Amino acid sequence: NNAIDKPKGYRVSWHHNPAVEKYHFGQLHPMKVWRLTLTKSLIMGYNMHHGMDLYSPPALTKEDIAAFHKEDYVDFLSVATPKNIVEMYPELAQPTGYSSSVYGVGDDCPIFDGLFEYCSYYSGASVDAARKLISGQSDVALNWTGGLHHAKKGEASGFCYINDIVLAILELLYHHPRVLYIDIDVHHGDGVEQAFWSTDRVFCVSFHKYDREVFFPGTGPLDSTGPMHPENPGRNHTINVPLNDGITDQDYAFLFDTVIGAVTRTYDPSVIVLQCGADSLGHDRLGCFNLNIKGHGHCVQFCTDYCTKYKKPLLVLGGGGYTPRNVARAWAHETSIAIGAADKIDSILPEDMPHREAFRKEGMTLFPNLGGWKTQNLNTRADIERIIRSVSEQLRYIRG
Ligand code: ZLS
Ligand code: CA
Ligand code: ZN
């Protein structure tokens, strides 16, 4: 572990309102809110909360949310319940006819009890984290309950209702000239990309599985780099890294370091926002990559090192992740990276950890082998070289 040393006075903040943990998407739904409880337990089991400032931020109000979202959509979310939704919109009750659905509601984005409170809590934590970075009270701010990148201005999408990332970036833009957004969730960060498509003040980079026909949301090809119009400031300020099944730690790290290294050099962001969706790990229920916990964590290490070196704030968010035990492992490991304790946690189970002996006997580890899963690596040398070539050509158009 050759992470760069943390300077004196370096502060990490953890933004988590435990109220988010009590909501349920439904029995069959892959989004399990209890993965957040598991993550918290692991972080606290390793005593990492002593290395951070803890905040339990308030819920956002409808007005706060309307900074990005359409008012009628926010009104709708704030009143919809499982009971009244079918009375208001009988078309949602049909087993087949929900495709042209109301505000994106349907099987992926169900209306469950307390939905609006759930949204206001996870978004409140992201906005609070952004504010602590702006005020200088924090250098790295974590919100594992956020990172819901698919939500649109007036529509829910892909398990996301309110786009906490967009709300946090809008907050950062009050004080920061240039925000770099990086998205390592296995899905394309379409909602954030769309929100900042026409500005050069936010640079969006998403790494994702791309297959237009079969993999959600079907957007984010290599040649989607911002608006076409030559006068539009957003032109060339989006990078998409479309990947095939089975990418390994080595290939992913090479792509990440090359692409993010080049973007940071040319764009010189004043702050970084990193969405850490854990569905890019091997063995994810919805994912298809072969990343291990440490391969995923490498991206967090890269960003914390960069931000420490150049004294820039970093906002770290959660996202997808559908094999809860691995989600908790990844985000606990990434918390240890943020506080500069990754090398300690590697081998040590804390003295006072509940069930410590049982864990040790079972050979339980933060780092199970998640590689070599399901598929082989279908990303060829040529694929990776094509991506690197395209990105370096694109970056020549960005003023240096
Ligand atoms: O990035 O693929 C789709 C859309 C469909 C297929 C699924 N049906 C239900 C709707 C139409 C084309 N949706 C994806 C969304 C993935 C969102 C990822 C979010 C994020 O990680 C950020 C948090 C999808 N993949 C798998 C499912 N949906 C899915 C699987 C199983 C179920 C159960 C509950 C619901 C219906 C049966 C469902 C969805
Ligand atoms: Ca992504
Ligand atoms: Zn995802």
Image: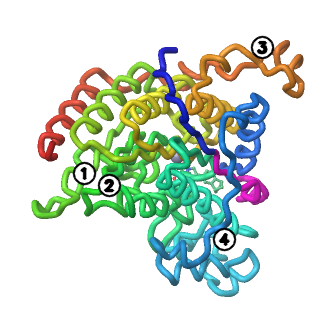
In this picture, residue 254 sits left or right of residue 392: right
What residue is pinned by disc 1?
237
Secondary structure under tag 3 reads: loop
Picture layout, residue 362 above or below residue 180: above
Mark 1 C-beta to ligand 2 under 8 Å: no
What residue is pinned by disc 3?
363
Which residue is farthest left? 230
What is the CA distance from the residue labelled 2 to the residue labelled 1? Answer: 7 Å
Secondary structure under tag 1 reads: loop
Secondary structure under tag 2 reads: strand
Secondary structure under tag 4 reads: helix
In this picture, residue 149 sits left or right of residue 312: right
| Dot 2 or dot 3, earlier in sequence | 2
The kind of residue tagged 2 is Val
What is the CA distance from the residue labelled 2 to the residue labelled 3? Answer: 44 Å
Asked whether disc 2 touches disc 1, contact meaning CB atoms under 8 Å apart, the reply is yes
Give me the disc on residue 202: 2
Please name the residue shown 51% across and 42% down the image.
Answer: 139
Picture quadrant of ligand 2: top left
Which residue is farthest bottom? 88
Q: Quadrant of residue 227?
A: bottom left
What residue is pinned by disc 4?
116
Asked whether disc 2 touches disc 3, contact meaning CB atoms under 8 Å apart, the reply is no
